[in-house]
Image: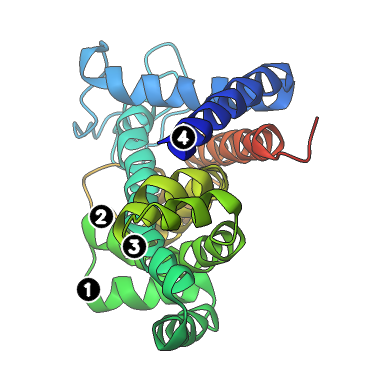
Amino acid sequence: MTVAIDVTNVTRKSQNRAWKKMKRNKSAIAGLIIISFFVLLALVAPLLPLADPYATSWSAIRKAPSMAHWMGTDDIGRDILSRMIWGAQASLMAGVISVAIAVAAGVPLGLVSGYFGGWIDQVISRITEAFLAMPFLIMAIALAAFLGPSLGNAMIAIGLSAMPVFIRLTRAQVLAVKSEDYIEGARSIGLGHHDIMLRYILPNIVPPIIVQATLTVATAIIAEASLSFLGLGQQAPAASWGSMLNVAKNYLSQAPWMAMWPGAAIFLVVIGFNLLGDGLRDALDPREH
């Protein structure tokens, strides 16, 4: 019981210290503001007085930005502003859910691999290395093509492609933590492997996993945009930033605004997640003061 109390107190103090450091990091706060802006837009999209993102108008094909259409219209007269905001739902959801799949699959495997070692570690490590031998985006494209073109399949493909990173990270953190004195103390009072892994090891390896997950969301958003650009992600007429770029590539000279807005949105969101991830890494690193 004493061990548990000590670990809890240390964790709480670390969280408070990390939050104070986070607030002083202006770039991390800027990233958080950018992400919050796009998330808020995606959440309130049904409540905003927007044009129908699916409504076509043959009299408004590829119209430049104006008071009627603030971001212009696309190749079949749909309002780009409306499709940008509704597309934020698909792009952000793809990034978050893909990483959730990667974490849900990768962390338990890494935890088991690092804790038990032996032949279990050998099997999981060799399979992980085989996955890591293939470039992330190439694997995502291959899996998405195998599963079939849809946003759901694209998220599964991206999540499975990102999973090996979390297996390796979790395994490395477990190897560093499982030799600590409080783990030995937990063993000495008779706790089983399950309790030690979930109550003592996992809470102490969460910070680096959070940092990696935040950075991976940015990578997943780019991957979803790439898959949608190739026709393997969000399918027409549903909007996502990647699918909008897929259409816009045919009209770069006649209607550059079709590519400009989704490209800028992807750039800003990716920058936001990277800034936030860097800030979290600095704030959660015990070596930083």
Q: Nearer the viewer, mark 3 or mark 2?
A: 3
Q: Nearer the viewer, residue 132 or 228?
A: 132
Label 4 to label 2, Cα distance in Å? 48 Å
Mark closest to the chain's N terminus, 3 or 4: 4
Indicate the quadrant where residue 140 lies: bottom left
Mark 4 — residue? 2
Label 1 to label 2, Cα distance in Å? 11 Å
- In what element is the residue under mark 1? helix
The circle on residue 193 is 3
Label 3 to label 4, Cα distance in Å? 19 Å
Label 3 to label 2, Cα distance in Å? 38 Å
- In what element is the residue under mark 3? helix
Write the residue at 41% across / 50% down: 242
Looking at the picture, how far across and down is residue 169, in whole percent?
55, 62
- In what element is the residue under mark 2? helix
Label 4 to label 1, Cα distance in Å? 50 Å
**Looking at the image, residue 60 lies above or below residue 230:** above
Amino acid type, mark 4: Thr
Amino acid type, mark 2: Leu
Mark 1 — residue? 147
Amino acid type, mark 3: His
Residue 274 visible to an observer of this rendering: yes
Quadrant that contains the C terminus: top right
Mark closest to the chain's N terminus, 3 or 2: 2
**For the view shown, which residue lies furthest in the front direction?**
189
**Looking at the image, residue 84 lies above or below residue 205:** above
Looking at the picture, how far across and down is residue 35, in whole percent?
50, 28
Looking at the picture, how far across and down is residue 287, in whole percent?
78, 41
Write the residue at 73% across / 23% down: 25
Label 1 to label 3, Cα distance in Å? 37 Å
Mark closest to the chain's N terminus, 4 or 2: 4
